[in-house]
Image (cartoon, rainbow, N blue to C red):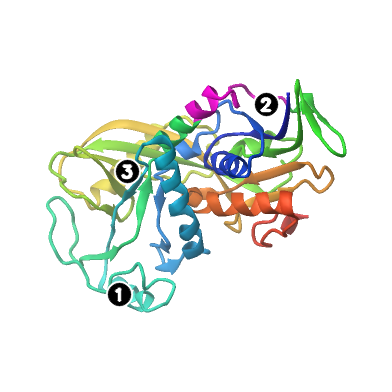
Amino acid sequence: MQVDYIVVGLGLAGLAFTQELEKNNKTFIVFEDESQNSSLVAGGMYNPVILKRFSPVWNAIPQLEKALPFYKKLEAKFNNKYDYKIDIYRIFKTVEEQNNWFVAADKPRLSPFMNTTIVNEKYKGINSECGFGRLTKTGRIDTISLLSDYKNYLLDRGKLIKESFDYEKLKISEKSVVYKKTSAKKIVFCEGFGIKKNPFFNYLPMVEVKGELITIHAPELNVDFLIKAAVFVLPLGDNYYRVGATFNWKDKTSIPTEEGKEELISKLKSFITVPFKVVEHKAGIRPTIKDRRPLVGKHPKHLNLVVLNGLGTRGVMIAPTVSEQLYNHLEKGIELDKEVSIQRFH
């Protein structure tokens, strides 16, 4: 088989890049073994504000301008809903936090999203003595449904092979790569933390961070907004809520732990007072970089080997932008943004 691109991995990065290939009539085949599941255990939120410090997310506004139409097109393509608009209510612990909110809300990059009226309304089951700060123009992408639909779409068209990638079987020449019976001009690795096993790109300084989430049923917690405090509480409908997430820098497995579950429950009880039942518990590994920027670009020696990785906790927002950048770099010779290019580590 002869194609323009081989893509390895089909999380949000792989999906966004193959969409870019489709848009430009490029042929491709995807290898995916579903071993890297950070996209499936992510909250899927898009939010341009770092709620710990009330500071702007890197390049958030242009990323959202690219991302929201991107997901809208996918909704039309698959006749399914993925983008759920939802406000975020940040619980204030102190009056000082209220003041910091007002200061941040005056900044041009934050003012479109941060409401300057403190929400003092009392909601049953939520400790909020100092009220809430309200974020608007935020939402959630249902990554589980989206990735499921997209995988089925590729399978139906013979563009997805469900198997682990064997690096030893990759043959590299100056103008092409050959993997088993498939020849391509380039290969793009979108493997998440699986890149640690990739002999071509494992030199990149990626840190794996384990995250755990629980889903709870709380019939008395009747809210239609995301609550952000010690953890986030995301409404899923029918009194179900997703709660997360932990950050574990030592455990490199994707196995849910009792410790992670207890940490989430303890933090949840610090501001939620109504009874709830844990109905699901998941874990995944986030691929993160020390400077919190993606890893994008060509291998320094083998120029037809390419990486698209390290989207971190904001993959929903970042994926469409960096995928388009990478495509333009590979096909049109346009330089990558220095902040995302892997040349910063060469």
**Residue drawn 50% across the image and 34% down it:** 37
Amino acid carrying mark 3 in the image: Val
Quadrant of the rendered image containing residue 41: top left
Q: CA distance from mark 1 to mark 3?
A: 26 Å
The earlier-in-sequence mark between 3 and 2 is: 2
The earlier-in-sequence mark between 1 and 2 is: 1
Mark 1 is surrounded, within 10 Å at the Cα level, by few (under 14), some (14 to 19) or many (20 or more) other residues, namely few
- Viewer-side residue, 258 vs 36: 36
The earlier-in-sequence mark between 1 and 3 is: 1
Q: Nearer the viewer, mark 1 or mark 3?
A: 3
Is 107 placed left or right of 272 in the picture? right
Mark 2 is surrounded, within 10 Å at the Cα level, by few (under 14), some (14 to 19) or many (20 or more) other residues, namely some
SS class of the residue under badge 3? strand
Q: Position of residue 61 (x, y in %)?
A: 47, 64
| Residue hosting label 1 | 96
Q: Tell me, yes or no, if residue 57 can be seen here.
A: no
Residue farthest to the front, as pictured: 25
Q: CA distance from mark 3 to mark 2?
A: 33 Å
Q: Tell me, yes or no, if residue 334 can be seen here.
A: yes
> Could you say which disc has been placed on residue 243 in the image?
3
Q: Which residues are magenta?
A: 151-166
Q: Nearer the viewer, mark 1 or mark 2?
A: 2
Amino acid carrying mark 1 in the image: Glu
> Could you say which disc has been placed on residue 165 in the image?
2
Quadrant where the image shows the C terminus: bottom right
**Residue drawn 41% across the image and 48% down it:** 72
Quadrant where the image shows the N terminus: top right
Residue farthest to the right, as pictured: 174
Q: Position of residue 92 (x, y in %)?
A: 27, 65
Q: Position of residue 236 (x, y in %)?
A: 27, 41
